[in-house]
Amino acid sequence: MATFGDIGLAAGVNVLSALIFLIAFAILRLQPINDRVYFPKWYLKGLRGSPARSGAFVSKIVNLDWHSYIRFLNWVPEALRMPEPELIDHAGLDSAVYLRIYLLGLKIFVPVALLAWAVLVPVNWTNNTLAKSQATDNLQYSDIDKLSISNIPIGSPRFWTHVVMAYAFTFWTCYALGREYEKVATLRLHFLASGRRRPDQFTVLVRNVPPDTDESVAESVEHFFLVNHPDHYLTHQVAVNANKLAKLVKEKKSKENWLDYYQLKYSRNQSKRPVTRTGFLGLWGEKVDAIDYQTAEVERLSKEVAEEREKVKTDPQCIMPAAFVSFRTRWGAAVCAQTQQSRNPTLWLTEWATEPRDVYWNNLAIPYVSLTIRRLLIAVAFFFLTFFFMIPVTIVQSLANIEGIERTAPFLKPVIEIPFIKSLIQGVLPGIALKIFLIVLPTILMTMSKVEGFLAISALERRSALRYYYFNFVNVFLVSVIAGTAFQQLDSFLHQPANEVPRTIGVAIPMKATFFITYVMVDGWAGVAGEILRLKPLIIFHLKNFFLVKTEKDREAAMDPGSIGFNTGEPQIQLYFLLGLVYAVVTPVFLPFIIVFFALAYVVFRHQIINVYNQEYESAGAFWPDVHGRIIFALVFSQIVLMGLLSSKGEAQSTPFLIALPVLTIFFHRFCKGRYEPAFVKYPLQEAMMKDTLERAREPNLNLRGYLQHAYVHPVFKNDEDDDDDDGCEDDFNAKLDENVQVPTKRQSRRGTPVPSRISGESSPEVVHDSQES
């Protein structure tokens, strides 16, 4: 069992690691050569230039101003100085709301910790239950466990203190959650009302467009919305399957990078032309001239890209039964997105379109009818992933302690028994072992989300975050507690009567707090400090800068600002909320470690959001209901754990008083869901009309069609450098889609409609007038 000394050593190691990371960052960020690594956001905004373009060569690499090293910790107040409105304008509402999760953690746990240490710690400490259990039952414990509820004797009236504290903690947590939900909802509505114009405010995504033998998909969409939304429909963009084209463009870009590398290498040493092998990654195969080979590959891929691009424009198989439909007003888009369009509820399905940079284009090619099957299969796959991951986690947790290592490798016992090594193993090893096992998990979960068919990067990240949270709850929390308890107390279980086992479990589960303390220090302290150092992006940038960069544009492309990483960061935060709420009453000594994490993470990520991360999308804080729901789940789970624990401690009479807690918490959650969640899933028509009215007054001559016409064109048709000389490439793409590309299916959409389609050869005066006005 970990002692105060073991935890102290672990804290010392992790604090030292964090300080090394922070000091290294503070020094590296001052060097001109690293400026684009630690301030890429300002470069991308065009607000910062290279700090040393003239002067001595050394001054372009190393900062020679010794005064700046005296102020090397100035980044901390600078990160905290920017007010929230300015932060929202600078980095977006998503980033500001994400930071509020850390603030919420501080708002909840600082008062809870103060109250717990003032009331619960003295109540727990002034008992000798564990000492008696060690003498009679040979139960293992440490001084840390004497600060927990395990040190209260069976049937003691002192448990009523924990019941009262559970009520106090619940009420305070719900109060903080409610205030924060209200604040974030207000921020979101204000952001949508006052923010700049965005294409997604006028656009809906239409899926499952019914097939028609007489019209192309583009014509069917235009006809349907001219009939059913005649006063508000403006334009549309049909979705296409350009996945193969995107792969070819990506491969071509890779070949061009290799060509640039070999040309730069040859320019530095023209005495010898570079060579490469034609096999996989240039590791085997025939030796050839690298420049000639890569030039030929680029030419081949350019031809394939041109052919595939033409195919996407003209082949009916590449046209998907989906489209981005844009309206003249936000009000019209809101009505369409939030209403049923057809008598058949499975056709003409509409939803708000995400902003163009948030669209995950690959999944537009997935047929709508296959989504249910895909999600069912992925749910089954995730269940088995979670289940089978229990095995290595259980093994690691059983081995990552002194007893487990000595049992597996007896020859290491003399080394392990050295006090420093023993403290290091018990205080650091368990957290590191678990962290290593979780490295590959985010990639697996994100792949699962992509297979499910979500059409927005934000939706992919939210689904991946949800699964990551479930996984952490099962494998990091439950399995760690159960496996650790079962292995550490096995000898005690075998020598006790069956009716004593629940009592031993009730005493032993709180003892697992020592493992989670080490995990928080490894992952939450050193891990967060390591995030600000950006060691991997630093190395990659300098490698690219040396081997590939020839122009300022290349240097900008070599920057890797990264992003918040909601799919990995938010589940980590939620795990700490879960641990803090579960152990607040059970083991209050845990809370200061959680508070240090939230405080350090808030400062670090605020700095990263201001100076580094480049926002991939803007969802206006749409993820907050997920954050709120998971904290409520953690709160209810902590209440259930406390009920079970007190029942095993002979306090069954307190259970009726605790049953009210989860009931009240769920009632509070339902209130918040009804009061605040609509702001995150619907757009009020009142707000839409107000925004439209103000815009018409301010910009009466706004060319909205020109603004929206190409907003949702697939990126490969915007960025393909082969077509830079074709100024009308997007217009040409849209025109080809509007040609008579027939989908061989039965037509029904024209039946009973007052306005004929293009194919009928007639146009109503209203439609002609409408088109001229636009």
Image (spheres, helix red, strand yellow):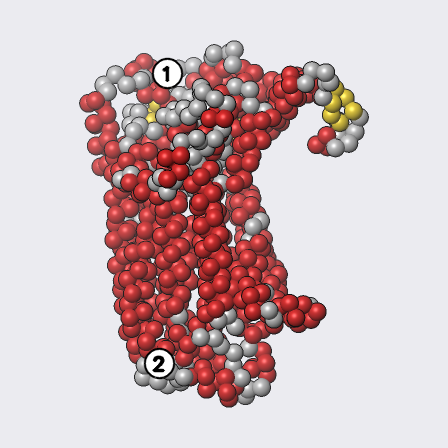
Looking at the image, which residue is at 52% across and 72% down?
A: 1
Image coordinates of residue 423 in percent, x first then y, are: 54, 66
Left or right placement of residue 433 versus residue 54 in this view: right
Looking at the image, which residue is at 46% across and 51% down?
A: 18
Dot 2: element: loop
Identity, as a three-letter code, of the amino acid under mark 1: Ser
Question: Alpha carbon of mark 1 to alpha carbon of mark 2: how far?
Answer: 89 Å
140 relative to 522, above or below? below
Looking at the image, which residue is at 68% across and 21% down?
A: 294
Q: Residue furthest right?
A: 286
Identity, as a three-letter code, of the amino acid under mark 2: Thr
Crowding at label 2, few (<14), some or many (≥20) Cα neighbours within 10 Å?
Answer: few
Residue sitting nearer the eye, 195 or 577: 577
Disc 1: which residue:
763
Looking at the image, which residue is at 47% across and 11% down?
A: 727
Q: Quadrant of residue 276?
A: top right
Q: Mark 1 or mark 2: name the one nearer the start of the chain.
A: 2
Residue 126 got which mark?
2
Image coordinates of residue 123 in percent, x first then y, are: 33, 78
